[in-house]
Image (spheres, helix red, strand yellow):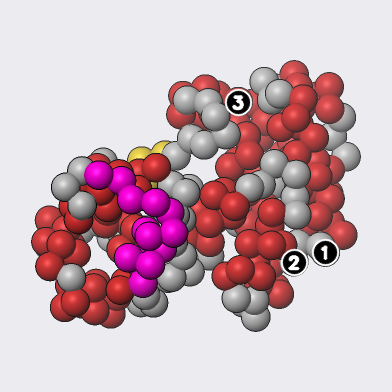
Amino acid sequence: MALRPILSSMKPAYWDEATQALASRDVVMARLIAEYPEITVQRRGDPFTTLARAIAGQQISVKAAQTIWDRFVAAAKGSGNPVHLDPARVGRMRVTTLRGVGLSENKALYIRDLARHFVTGALDPREWRALDDEDLILRLTAVHGIGRWTAEMFLMFHELRPDVLPVADIGLQNAVAIHYHGGTRIPIAELREFAAMWSPWRSVATWYLWRSLDPIPVEY
């Protein structure tokens, strides 16, 4: 999935509490937090647009994803909002039209499926606050083209959930190996147990571990 650079002074309400707690219990976290004092995660866009963009950018370069996305928005927005897309309008778009902007046939079908989930209410952001992380992940992964990793990124970057641990993420695995295990990656089950010490701020810990590999923050 393509991720875009971002640097912002905005931060979630819990960020200071999380960084203080992590730094007090983990010397590695304390060092990383001190090294990157001016960066944080920030929400961008509405839920439908964010998820559609995530699907469009899967498994291609940032540059290619941006080109395709710009074409898609131009085709989908009509005379509407150029940033927030209308799921009903997108759901009515023909696959041939979506293919014409550079989307693969599968991605075209996935984005239409996503749109129909929003139109029918199968995905209703008004309900999400009452759902725990796993329940929301289950709702999201019911959409074709949204796997667990994409759902976890959405929870971290858009919903700003503080305690998500994307154990299948290679960057997280590598960072834990480098900082805690002499460069040796540990099995996912062990990683999950190891990361329990960061709860309930595992999203924040993951963010700083990613920064240790790539100092430029990203947005989802």
- What x and y, as percent, mark residue 37? 17, 60
Give percent across and percent down for residue 9: 28, 60
Residue placed most toward the observer, 67 or 184: 184
Query: On the image, numbered disc 1 is attached to which residue?
Result: 121
Is the Cβ of the residue at disc 1 closer than 8 Å to that at disc 2?
Answer: yes
Residue 162, quarter of picture = bottom left
Does the magenta segment cover residue 125?
A: no
SS for dot 3 = helix
The disc, 1 or 3, on the residue closer to the chain's N-terminal end is 3
Q: Is residue 200 above or below residue 189?
A: below
Residue neighbourhood size for the residue with mark 1, other residues' Cα within 10 Å, grouped as few (<14), some (14–19), many (≥20): few
- Residue 49 visible in this rendered orientation of the protein: no
Which residues lie in the magenta part?
Answer: 184-196
Q: Quadrant of residue 140?
A: bottom right
Which is the main secondary structure of the residues drawn in magenta? helix
Q: Quote the CA–CA distance across marks 1 and 2.
A: 5 Å
**Residue plotted at (80% across, 41% down):** 112
Mark 3 or mark 2, earlier in chain = 3
Of 24 and 124, the residue lying toward us: 24
Q: Amino acid at mark 1?
A: Gly
Q: Measuring 57% from the left and 70% from the top, which residue is drawn there? A: 133
Q: State the mark number for residue 68.
A: 3
